[in-house]
Amino acid sequence: MANILHHMPELDPEEMAFVQGIVNHMSDNQAQQFVSIYRSRRREPLLVLITAVVGFFGVAGIHRFILGHIGMGILYFFTGGLCLVGTIVDLINYKRLAFEYNIKEAQKVQAMMSSQYGGANGYY
C-alpha cells in the first residue's frame, strides 16, 4: 500500500485524500508510475488563478483553455469573460476548477494503468 504523502506532498488535503484512495491498492512501483504520469497532467490552482487574472485584465478565457474547457474558453474570449462576470466567478472558484480538472486527470491515469496491468481494479 503506497502513501501518496511521500510521493506528492504538495497536494491539497482534499485532492490528497482522493488520490490516496486511488493508490491504496497499488504497489510502490505502480504508485510511483501513477504519480509520474499524474504530476505531468495535473494543473496547479495557482496557475488557474494567474491565468484567470490575466483574463480579467487582458485576454479572457485562457484559464478555461488550460483546463480543457475549449467551448467555454471560446465563449469567454468572444464575450470578454461573459462581460467579466464569469471571470470574476472563476477567480473566486479557481481552486474548485483546478480540483475538478485534477480529479478527472487522476481517473484517466487510473483507467490507463488499469488497462495496462489488467484485472478488475488493475492493481493485484
Image: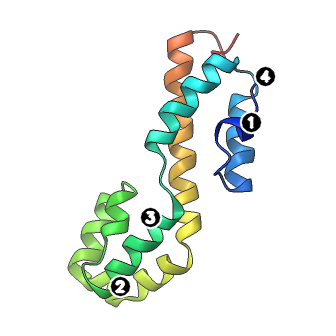
Pointer 1 or 2: first along the chain: 1
Which secondary structure, mark 4? Answer: loop
Q: Residue placed at 70% from the left, 47% from the top?
A: 16
**Is label 3 or label 2 in front?**
3
Q: Identify residue type, mark 3.
A: Leu
Q: Which mark is residue 21?
A: 1
Q: Position of residue 64 (x, y in %)?
A: 36, 65
Q: Residue placed at 53% from the left, 63% from the top?
A: 45
Q: Identify residue type, mark 4.
A: Met
Q: Residue placed at 29% from the left, 78% from the top?
A: 60
Q: Which residue is mark 2?
A: 56
Neighbor class of circle 1 (other Cα within 10 Å; few <14, some 14-19, many 20+) is few
**Is label 1 or label 3 in front?**
3
Q: Position of residue 70 (x, y in %)?
A: 29, 59
Pointer 3 or 2: first along the chain: 3
Q: Identify residue type, mark 2.
A: Phe
State which quarter of the image contains the N terminus.
Answer: top right
Pointer 4 or 3: first along the chain: 4
Q: Which residue is mark 4?
A: 1
Question: Is residue 38 rendered to the left or right of residue 26?
Answer: left
Pointer 1 or 3: first along the chain: 1
- For the residues labelled 3 and 2, the Cα–Cα distance comes to 14 Å
